[in-house]
């Protein structure tokens, strides 16, 4: 009897209880209860696989018993039965979580077949959950989920490099999870988990960044009213994560080179060296090798940083991970927003697999949160997700911007878009598309560069640099055009 499924029959009519028990006891371990209190005694003391309960139990309500049973840590499969069957009652029972609904007089063969089918369904569901957990354990490290082939060498490298003290450079597009990888390396390193300090280099001016990294002495500059301990000292014995390392200025690069090479720093306003024991992990979405060639980044610092390099792939290169990532975010964000977990609808995943995700995992997470908040059904359907998912190539950069529009640029000013018809897709190159999206973000934010940068998934400093480049390009075009008009022969 130990290998048989347990069935609890709940009915206030004795002949129904006994008839079902006699019919089912050859194949199942059967228990009977005449009311909700007796049923809950069985449910609380023994593991019940299937509960077959009447809708009306004398003074008790079968629907309430259904709700209570399904709220248990290990709920049984619930099948409702009643002589008062109706479409509305059946729908309500199924909505509350009942597996199926049968009406009296019962067809005993049908009931037995239904119970066996319910048990097979639950077995498959449990196997699927177990397999999914096994896959997540196999292809995840410290919260990094990845089954795609391109992720396997990255996960292997993380495990290999983590116990060492080697400096790591993480490269990849914005939103690919560089900080998550940095924290995984730190957490697996054996250093105290809490002792990781992050610095967003692009968010600080050169003067503030230097003080932020190395600290300063009282009176070392205007406003320095007391000594400040820098991030290197805060991270002593642990890890310092330098995000957007490509944005630091030449002076800070020199000091950082010394800190990496000698494991010593000096606070601003002091010449006293301070010994440190800090493992540095840096990240960038820029091409540092190209910046070295252009003289914008020190070559010696570049080689210090890239002892080990990890190149994170964009989400469009690992689309097979989208289902796992999406389900992870559905659970996480449902809990964060006080919502019940809902799986993706049948039309949502195909659209997500076609989309190019220019904002990468950060954009996917934002889209899932949109769906979690907007869903008013049992699943997160395509209609609940952001409308830009209907554009497979992701020209909206994940922020739902309108089609690009022609603009007039004035050097040194924040440009404002003019209203006119969008250019043909064939007329746009990738730089022009980016420029138009930046302008649209500025328009939507009321020319607030900080807000526009957040909408575009970049730092304010990066946005300022791109605006400067845009103005330089447009100025150059005007000069070329003016020169060509001057040289053109008179007609």
Image (spheres, rainbow, N blue to C red):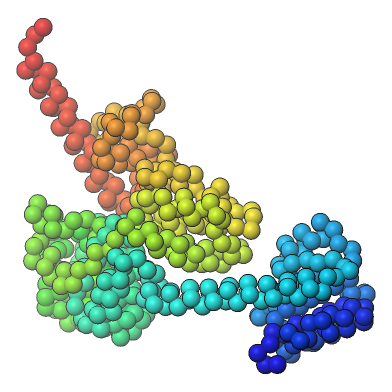
Q: Is residue 199 above or below residue 372?
A: below
Q: Is residue 213 above or below residue 427?
A: below
Q: Quadrant of residue 448?
A: top left
Q: Is residue 93 above or below residue 14?
A: above
Residue visible at 70% across and 81% down in the picture: 49
Q: Nearer the viewer, residue 451 or 365?
A: 365
Q: Nearer the viewer, residue 269 or 60?
A: 60
Return the residue found at the far bottom.
2
Q: Quadrant of residue 124?
A: bottom right
Residue visible at 64% across and 58% down in the picture: 378
Q: Nearer the viewer, residue 54 or 177?
A: 54
Q: x%, y% of residue 136?
A: 43, 74
Residue visible at 78% across and 66% down in the picture: 101
Left or right: 288 with respect to 86? Answer: left
Quadrant of the frame with the C terminus: top left
Determine if residue 280 is in view.
Answer: yes
Residue visible at 66% across and 80% down in the picture: 73
Q: x%, y% of residue 27?
A: 73, 84
Q: How many marks?
A: 0
Left or right: 211 with respect to 399? Answer: left
Q: x%, y% of residue 240?
A: 26, 73
Quadrant of the frame with the N terminus: bottom right
Return the residue found at the far top.
491
Left or right: 5 with respect to 417? Answer: right
Q: x%, y% of residue 337?
A: 57, 62
Determine if residue 35 is in view.
Answer: no
């Amino acid at each position: 009897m130990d290998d048989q499924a347990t069935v609890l029959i709940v009915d206030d009519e004795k002949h129904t209880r006994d008839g079902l028990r006699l019919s089912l006891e050859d194949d199942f371990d059967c228990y009977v209860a005449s009311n909700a209190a007796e049923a809950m005694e069985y449910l609380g003391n023994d593991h019940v696989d299937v509960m077959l309960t009447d809708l009306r139990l004398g003074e008790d309500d079968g629907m309430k018993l259904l709700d209570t049973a399904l709220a248990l840590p290990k709920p049984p499969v619930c099948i409702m039965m009643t002589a008062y069957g109706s479409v509305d009652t059946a729908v309500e029972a199924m909505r509350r979580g009942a597996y199926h609904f049968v009406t009296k007089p019962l067809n005993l063969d049908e009931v037995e077949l239904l119970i066996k089918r319910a048990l097979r369904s639950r077995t498959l569901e449990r196997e699927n959950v177990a397999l999914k957990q096994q896959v997540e354990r196999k292809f995840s490290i410290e919260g990094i989920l990845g089954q795609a082939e391109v992720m396997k060498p990255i996960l292997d490298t993380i495990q290999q490099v983590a116990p060492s003290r080697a400096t790591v450079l993480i490269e990849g597009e914005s939103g690919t999870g560089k900080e998550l990888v940095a924290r995984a390396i730190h957490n697996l390193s054996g250093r105290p988990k809490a002792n990781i300090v992050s610095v967003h280099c692009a968010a600080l001016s050169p003067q503030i960044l230097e003080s932020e990294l190395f600290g300063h002495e009282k009176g070392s500059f205007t406003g320095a009213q007391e000594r400040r301990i820098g991030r290197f000292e805060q991270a002593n014995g642990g890890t310092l994560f330098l995000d957007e390392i490509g944005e630091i200025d030449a002076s800070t690069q020199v000091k950082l080179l010394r800190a990496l090479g000698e494991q010593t720093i000096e606070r601003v306003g002091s010449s006293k060296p301070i010994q440190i024991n800090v493992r540095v992990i840096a990240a960038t979405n820029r091409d540092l090798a190209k910046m070295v060639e252009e003289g914008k980044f020190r070559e010696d610092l570049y080689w210090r940083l890239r002892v080990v390099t990890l190149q994170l792939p964009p989400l469009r290169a690992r689309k097979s991970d989208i289902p796992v990532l999406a389900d992870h975010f559905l659970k996480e964000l449902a809990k964060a927003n006080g919502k019940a977990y809902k799986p993706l609808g049948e039309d949502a995943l195909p659209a997500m697999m076609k989309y190019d995700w220019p904002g990468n995992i950060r954009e996917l997470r934002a889209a899932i949160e949109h769906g979690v908040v907007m869903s008013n059904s049992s699943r997160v359907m395509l209609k609940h997700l952001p409308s830009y998912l209907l554009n497979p190539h992701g020209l909206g950069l994940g922020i739902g911007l309108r089609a690009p529009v022609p603009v007039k640029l004035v050097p040194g000013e924040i440009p404002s878009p003019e209203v006119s018809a969008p250019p043909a897709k064939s007329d746009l190159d990738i730089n022009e598309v980016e420029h138009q999206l930046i302008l649209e973000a500025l328009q939507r934010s009321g020319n607030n560069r900080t807000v526009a940068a957040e909408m575009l998934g970049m730092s304010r400093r990066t946005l300022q640099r791109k605006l400067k480049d845009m103005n330089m390009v447009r100025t150059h075009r005007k000069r070329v055009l003016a020169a060509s008009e001057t040289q053109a022969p008179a007609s």
